[in-house]
Image: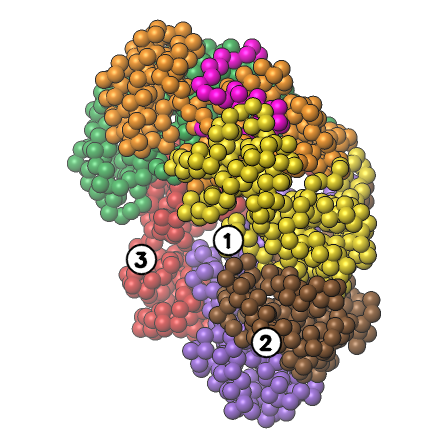
Chain colours: A purple, B brown, C yellow, D orange, E green, F red
Amino acid sequence: MAAPYYRPVGKEVEIFDAAAAQRLPLLLKGPTGSGKSRFLEAMAQRLGRRLITVVCNDETSAIDLVGRYLVKGSDTYWLDGPLTTAVRSGAILYIDEIAEARPDTMVVLHSLTDHRRELFVERLGETIAGHVDFLLVASFNPGYQKGFKELKPSTRQRFIAIDFNYPRAEIEAEIVQEETGCEAQLAQRLVKLAGVIRARPELGLAETVSTRLLVSVAKLVRNGLPPRLAVHTGLVLPLSDDADTVTALQDFANLVL
Amino acid sequence: MAAPYYRPVGKEVEIFDAAAAQRLPLLLKGPTGSGKSRFLEAMAQRLGRRLITVVCNDETSAIDLVGRYLVKGSDTYWLDGPLTTAVRSGAILYIDEIAEARPDTMVVLHSLTDHRRELFVERLGETIAGHVDFLLVASFNPGYQKGFKELKPSTRQRFIAIDFNYPRAEIEAEIVQEETGCEAQLAQRLVKLAGVIRARPELGLAETVSTRLLVSVAKLVRNGLPPRLAVHTGLVLPLSDDADTVTALQDFANLVL
Amino acid sequence: MAAPYYRPVGKEVEIFDAAAAQRLPLLLKGPTGSGKSRFLEAMAQRLGRRLITVVCNDETSAIDLVGRYLVKGSDTYWLDGPLTTAVRSGAILYIDEIAEARPDTMVVLHSLTDHRRELFVERLGETIAGHVDFLLVASFNPGYQKGFKELKPSTRQRFIAIDFNYPRAEIEAEIVQEETGCEAQLAQRLVKLAGVIRARPELGLAETVSTRLLVSVAKLVRNGLPPRLAVHTGLVLPLSDDADTVTALQDFANLVL
Amino acid sequence: MAAPYYRPVGKEVEIFDAAAAQRLPLLLKGPTGSGKSRFLEAMAQRLGRRLITVVCNDETSAIDLVGRYLVKGSDTYWLDGPLTTAVRSGAILYIDEIAEARPDTMVVLHSLTDHRRELFVERLGETIAGHVDFLLVASFNPGYQKGFKELKPSTRQRFIAIDFNYPRAEIEAEIVQEETGCEAQLAQRLVKLAGVIRARPELGLAETVSTRLLVSVAKLVRNGLPPRLAVHTGLVLPLSDDADTVTALQDFANLVL
Amino acid sequence: MAAPYYRPVGKEVEIFDAAAAQRLPLLLKGPTGSGKSRFLEAMAQRLGRRLITVVCNDETSAIDLVGRYLVKGSDTYWLDGPLTTAVRSGAILYIDEIAEARPDTMVVLHSLTDHRRELFVERLGETIAGHVDFLLVASFNPGYQKGFKELKPSTRQRFIAIDFNYPRAEIEAEIVQEETGCEAQLAQRLVKLAGVIRARPELGLAETVSTRLLVSVAKLVRNGLPPRLAVHTGLVLPLSDDADTVTALQDFANLVL
Amino acid sequence: MAAPYYRPVGKEVEIFDAAAAQRLPLLLKGPTGSGKSRFLEAMAQRLGRRLITVVCNDETSAIDLVGRYLVKGSDTYWLDGPLTTAVRSGAILYIDEIAEARPDTMVVLHSLTDHRRELFVERLGETIAGHVDFLLVASFNPGYQKGFKELKPSTRQRFIAIDFNYPRAEIEAEIVQEETGCEAQLAQRLVKLAGVIRARPELGLAETVSTRLLVSVAKLVRNGLPPRLAVHTGLVLPLSDDADTVTALQDFANLVL
């Protein structure tokens, strides 16, 4: 896969370099679609390291990271999980949405994130020293489900952190244009619309407009949909099911476009 | 199976075409029996693509989409799930009632719904690039269980959306007639009755009259039941168990028919 | 098994015939012991179709309807579940107390209850078209656990419905006599007692006297128990554990008998 | 095992005979230690029928009644559960504390407790007609966990019922003496003490003194413990952990003995 | 293992003898560290019977008591659980903290604790008569989790009971000295401190000082720690995490020592 | 692995020696990053004993400590768990975050933590006497989830305890310098900043600054990040997601640095 387009918005590259040099585990904090995954892909390519991604959910457990025995016919063989693979080979392991995973997932990371820097694989009876290039990165969306699913302090304090947020208007417009090949004016108007909506917490959206939505809208316009219908389809309806909120959002769109 | 009868009620065909051209995941929002599934069947036939449907429930999990190892005698073999089949072969995968499924179901879709457009099958250790014709469509009923089972923002913002609702009276009557071969007058009166009931939220129905119910009533009449008994059997009792509501609904029916 | 005794109390036979002719799924609504199961047995015999019954509980799941792989020694073979058997062979499938079952049970019925009329058996990778004689019937007791276990609207609107209730006094007495061979006077008095109790919601019974209880009492009397003891044993104690309610019920019985 | 000692306290034998003759399922209602199990053992011996007992708990399920496949080496064989054994062989099946069992346990009894009188064993694909001597008996303690674990009306109305309670003073004293060989005076005083405690609901006991406790006390006295210590050990401490209640109970004991 | 040191504090030995002679199940009630287990060890040695102990927890189930099939290579064999072993061989089975176990654990004891005195092992299809020397003893801590985890009355009334509490001061000091070889004065002061703390429910301790803690402190002093540090380490910190309570406890200690 | 750097802050070494000599189980109480694990590593090296660590989580159960049967092809073999290994070989078993584990984990420790000092391995039918050098150590963080996950008193009173807290300023600065090679002034300022934050409970942090965070910051500075950005990345963002708290923390940092 070719290197993804990535446009730095702050000091995130410098921080990443320091974390990689000091082998400090790194936590990417920020909302949906703010570019966390894309940033990490670019950084992995920059360092020439393999990136292994695990997207967590309610049922992700330590075994999903470490590995398991599989049975094939009458043979049993061990399959390294993504964490074990990364620890052995010096890859970057990206644990996306770490707060969603089951608690045993955190615990297996402890010995890798302190002075020991080693992984104990109980089922193999084997302790694996972390490869010199192994790096642990996790992501976390603090705005979503505030107070519900949080990381335990004993896990959090094992990571240094970078805050991601939506890029400045000029940069965001540049991203939309680069991703869709749309006209500059459309990109600017969509970014303006995003700014208007993001500035209104009273809309009560579970999460506000991401850059990803702007890209979807621009693609629909490029494919011939009228801008207002494209915004309705690609931005308004994905953001809300509530009739009043849908009307309010569409009104903002009609004003800005 | 022959192409189902489908009567467009808005710009949904144009939006579908743009989504398919841009390979944007598509969310069909709307109440029970508003024609979401039928619309998609018609679109799949129009594009000449295979449609694979998964109806979700509380226990639908990623494994149900991706596939699993089966044991047959002493042999073990892998069986692609519907998602994997669709990704490989370029089919349309329809995830009906996606909000019902378990959270890991969403997560497995992430890499297919962003710039990566690929599926990682952990159990096979294989990453499958999405076929150029692969398209992901999901349905969601926002009125039902409001605030209870909702899609996470990080999932929603990966889809563009179309709103489905009950069709305009003329179109709905046309559908009832087309589906049952009943007389125009009966179809019109049933649609009028539906309009009366849909306009009365004070009835407190969990969900209001769908076109499907009108079709059932027309079929019962075609089979010789008197219209009032047909409405009682095919519309009133399916909508409510409450004695007062049943009486109110039947009164409306008696007035309109 | 010989055809059970069944005494129609309304238009239920005509509605059943129309549902069978139009292949509309049918929901039997009504309290315990109001004759729903017996009605369906009689209808199945009338049409000369096989009746397959599944009584649902909290743990009934789709697999219980569709079928499963069984292991016998080193062989594995597939066993069709009751739904699959009925779909293939054109039997009537009766899903008794459908609201008790787990949600995935409903979902598996969806494609059988709309224009598709087919069953997808994921484990076999097989889609089975519904036999021309296949008919789906379910039962539901709306009075019991009101507001607790209800059918989702998206399931309910797939069925037409018949309301069952206790039969008129003359018919109920006829049923009691027919079932037990007791004297007409006893049957009439028991039905009168049932009427008295059913008319008193202030007794706070979880469910009121069913015809089945009257039959039990008549059988005990036929076996030599004094009527009051028979009512105490066969009607009062089965209805309540509360001392005051037991006394009140027995007082009614002593008055009427 | 020799026939247990059983002393009738009401019309329970006559009712049992009628239930057995009419093959009506029978529910024994009453508190702990009121002689339900012992009564049934005596009745089974009287009829010369085998008695099979299942004591239910939170995890008792249909499979525990019906049977299961067992694996032994590479062979798989079916083992009839207690219900299946009783249905085939004409035994009495006693389901002790039926309200504790999981809901699927009730459901499997339905076809055995109405006009069908047959058991469908899904795993065997076999329908077993009830042996002419098969009888179903269940027990239920209505005072315990009132309003918490109750039988569903659709299950209750399938049984006729007998109320058990503590026997009259003379009979209870007779039972204590018969069971322990203690002196008449001690038995009478213990029964008097039981009467005093049973008449005081303000003590707030989860359940009051059973005949079984009186028997324990009499045995301890027969083995040389002083009566007051025997009552403390065999009656007071088993009834309560609360210091005030323990004192109150012991005060009653000291007064009566 | 040599007989443990046990110092009777009341009539518990006489009661135990009567229970053993009459084969009455015995419940040991009392707080942590009050000597219940040690008492039973001494009684078992006195009678020359084997003592088998099961410490219950939230997941202890009937199968843990009765036994299970184990698979070894292609062979399957049955392993008697501790209850079955005790029933067959005439040992004393000690079910420690019985209220913690899962409810099916109680139920399996029922037939062993009434006139039947036999164990039915369903998986073996075998009924095992209790050995003449088999004795069932259970422990229960009524002060801990009051009102949360309690024994069902139908279980409790199957046991006679002994109350355990902390021993009188002279006896407790004797025990501390005997166990640690410390000086009489230290033992007396520690017991005095225990008395002071036990008399202050306002400290809000989940459970108060046990004799075991006093023994720990005396051991630490014997190993050279200063008494105040030994009390802090062996008594104060094990009792509380609350800063104010820790200070209060240490103040008492400083006063008494 | 070389002996880790450990700097005693109180009498913890003396207490450890007494516990080891008397074989008293030891509980290390204290917040995240206060050096509990590192202390124990140093003590194990000092005694020349092997240290085996188990980090507990919500799903840690007795089987994870004791061992299990594994299947490899057609062979089954037993694998000792970490507890069994430690008991047999005389190692130190460290149960990190013991309060997180499932309750059966505690129960398996009971016979090892009283006068018996032996482990019963039910699956092996084997009782293993504790090696003379076996020592049990557990850790517990009382500040975290206060009142939520606590140790049962019957478990706590089996341990003596040491309180860990953050070291005095001079010692903490020494640790930061030793671990990172940073300049003395930076270490002192970071420790001063930690003191300022720790003294402000009104910040409402789930857990306050650990020494570990100070070390992370010093490493980032050593790698060239400006101190304020290093503190933002390595201390502020790991401690809080709340915008106001983040600002307050950064203000403190800007003042102190």
Residue E65 drawn at (x, y percent): 54, 26
Question: What chain does mark 2 sit on?
Answer: B
Query: Which circle marks residue C146 in the picture?
Result: 1
The foreground one among E204 and D110 is D110
Query: Which portion, as a residue range, is magenta?
Result: D1-30
From the image, state whether disc 2 or disc 1 is nearer to you: 2
Q: Is residue A6 magenta?
A: no
Residue depicted at 38% across the width and 37% down the height = C244
Residue topped by disc 3 = F170
Inter-mark Cα distance, 3 to 2: 80 Å
Q: Is residue D32 above or below residue C88?
A: above
User: Could you tell whether A202 is left or right of A22 in the image?
Assistant: left
Number of marks present in the image shown: 3
Name the residue rendered at 24%, 41% in the picture.
E203
- Residue D41 x/y as whole percent: 55, 18
Residue sitting at the far bottom: A185
Q: Quadrant of residue B213?
A: bottom right
Disc 1, SS: loop
Q: Are marks 1 and 3 on the same chain?
A: no
Q: Label 1: chain? A: C
Same chain? Circles 2 and 1: no
Kind of residue at badge 1 = Lys
> Which residue does the numbered mark 2 point to in the structure image?
B195
